[in-house]
Image (cartoon, grey):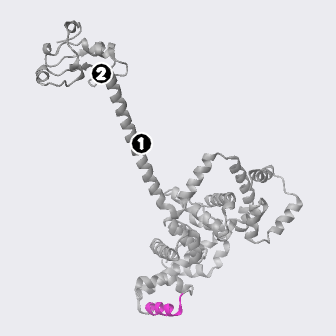
């Protein structure tokens, strides 16, 4: 995208002016387009198409980055940075993987780099637990298992879980986040981290061993 | 199948991703091995515990301003177009990628070698400059020749002669640095008399009767 178009786009948002009605209609149409088509549109200078991609993936990327950092302000910044990086580099995107895999890889790399830089400076800023957790059968089973030995509240469990995750190395934390929290397959994780499935399995194995010892009171 | 191998397959077993014959072998091992059964139960509980993190979610309005913030940042990035910042960012991105982590060490090593080579080159250059300066002084600078001619003859001197620095500095070139602070020290005569070749540049200077007329020489 040309710089002038970028400036126009940013300027529109800074002035707080709303896009005209036809633009809104067009954006609604774009919602139904595939990622590849939206990428092509953006590469041809249509910045609205990229807005649709941002809207489509921001929450998924946020969840991954949040679980890796345990800090929602950092997660928000990193996801913003990820989309800016993707937007600026979109011309170099050749479609060898899906847009989501590509942008996900950018997010994971940036997050790992961020965690390395802030090493030993963990600051927690946790999202609230959704109230529907009370109905989760896994939680009910878990609490019934833990409670006889020691009284533990949900908030404490929440904090201990995040503390334990923050003690893992960046790559182990990324693998656990993607597999055990987000439910991604080994193959997808291998693509996102540009490593073999064997490496993913190995990292997962050692990360879980470490977590088992860190969370032994709750298992 | 050994315990470690079996334990690495628990994850695939629980997700039913194993080939039927391998799954049978793992189950058979679990039936016989108490240790692996305990590990398997703890591993399953850990996965349920980690899955609870999915309930950590931001409030629904958290992403309301995400797109406008993205546009503002894109604008700010577009205005910040210094080429050096782009180069730094590219280097930063390159180093952030896990697959080229080893490049960091190579880069650090190359920079270290470059620094050492620069220091060696500077050192050699300084030595050359110094040699050039002394050669020039001995052969061509008439002021130093005149200064040498003012010194007393070797035979009449005691073991050492301490000439005041002020007298020497009056005639020496501005860039000359004495090696002994405050005085010029000459060696004793007998050793000089026995050797055919002059040991110091000062020895080449013929001694005349005028050499004895130095008022400030202290014996």
**Above or below: residue A212 compared with residue B206:** below
Q: Is residue A58 left or right of residue B29?
A: right
- Report in which chain the residue with disc 2 lies: B
User: Considering depth in this image, is A31 or B82 the residue closer to the camera?
Assistant: B82
The reply to whether residue A128 is visible in this rendering is no
The reply to whether residue B214 is visible in this rendering is yes
Task: Bin the neighbour count of mark 1 within 10 Å (Cα to Cα): few under 14, some 14-19, many 20 and up.
Answer: few
Residue B83 colored magenta?
no
- Relative image position of residue B167 (x, y in whole percent): 29, 12
Quadrant assignment, res A41: bottom right
Instruction: Report the quarter where the C terminus of chain B lies.
Output: top left
- Report in which chain the residue with disc 1 lies: B
Quadrant assignment, res A158: bottom right
Rendered image: mark on residue A193: none
Q: Is residue A54 left or right of residue B13?
A: right
The residue that mark 2 highlights is B138
Q: Which residues are magenta?
A: B18-30
Q: Residue at x 56, y 54 (%)?
A: B92
Query: Regarding mark 2 in the picture, which secondary structure is present there?
Result: helix
Task: Bin the neighbour count of mark 2 within 10 Å (Cα to Cα): few under 14, some 14-19, many 20 and up.
Answer: some
The residue that mark 1 highlights is B118
Q: Is residue A77 left or right of residue B67?
A: left
**Distance Cα–Cα, label 2 vs label 1:** 30 Å
Q: Is residue A217 left or right of residue B127?
A: right
**Above or below: residue B62 compared with residue B33:** above
Q: Which badge, 2 or 1, comes first in the chain's sequence?
A: 1
């Amino acid at each position: 995208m040309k710089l002038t178009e970028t400036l126009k786009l940013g300027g529109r948002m800074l002035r707080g002016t709303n896009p005209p009605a036809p633009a809104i209609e067009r954006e609604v149409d774009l919602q139904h387009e595939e990622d590849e088509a939206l990428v092509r549109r953006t590469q041809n200078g249509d910045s609205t198409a990229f807005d649709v991609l941002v809207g489509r993936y921001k929450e998924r990327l946020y969840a991954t980055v949040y679980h890796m950092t345990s800090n929602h302000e950092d997660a928000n910044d990193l996801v913003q940075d990820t989309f800016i990086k993707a937007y600026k580099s979109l011309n170099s995107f050749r479609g060898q993987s899906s847009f989501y895999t590509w942008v996900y890889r950018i997010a994971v790399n940036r997050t790992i780099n961020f965690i390395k830089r802030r090493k030993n400076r963990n600051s927690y800023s946790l999202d609230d637990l959704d109230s529907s957790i009370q109905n989760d059968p896994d939680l009910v089973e878990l609490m019934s298992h833990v409670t006889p030995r020691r009284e533990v509240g949900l908030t404490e469990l929440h904090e201990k879980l995040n503390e334990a995750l923050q003690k893992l190395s960046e790559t182990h934390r990324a693998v656990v986040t993607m597999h055990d929290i987000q439910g991604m397959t080994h193959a997808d994780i291998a693509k996102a981290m540009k490593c073999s499935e064997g490496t993913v399995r190995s990292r997962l194995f050692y990360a879980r061993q470490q977590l088992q010892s860190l969370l032994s009171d709750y298992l | 199948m050994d315990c470690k191998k079996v334990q690495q397959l628990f994850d695939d077993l629980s997700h039913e991703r194993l080939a039927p014959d391998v799954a049978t072998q793992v189950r058979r091992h679990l039936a016989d091995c108490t240790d692996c059964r305990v590990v398997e139960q703890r591993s399953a509980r850990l996965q349920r515990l980690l899955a609870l993190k999915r309930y950590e979610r931001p409030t629904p309005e958290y992403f309301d301003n995400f797109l406008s913030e993205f546009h503002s940042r894109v604008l700010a990035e577009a205005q910040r177009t210094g080429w050096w910042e782009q180069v730094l960012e590219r280097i930063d991105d390159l180093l952030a990628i896990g697959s080229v982590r080893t490049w960091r060490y190579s880069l650090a090593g190359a920079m270290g070698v470059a620094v050492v080579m620069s220091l060696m080159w500077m050192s050699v250059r300084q030595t050359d400059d110094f040699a050039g300066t002394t050669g020039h002084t001995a052969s061509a600078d008439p002021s130093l020749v005149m200064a040498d001619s003012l010194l007393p003859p070797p035979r009449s001197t005691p073991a050492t002669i301490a000439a005041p620095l002020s007298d020497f500095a009056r005639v020496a070139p501005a860039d000359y640095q004495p090696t002994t602070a405050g005085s010029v020290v000459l060696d004793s005569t007998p050793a000089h008399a026995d050797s055919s070749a002059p040991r110091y540049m000062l020895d080449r200077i013929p001694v005349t009767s005028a050499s004895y007329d130095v008022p400030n020489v202290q014996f």
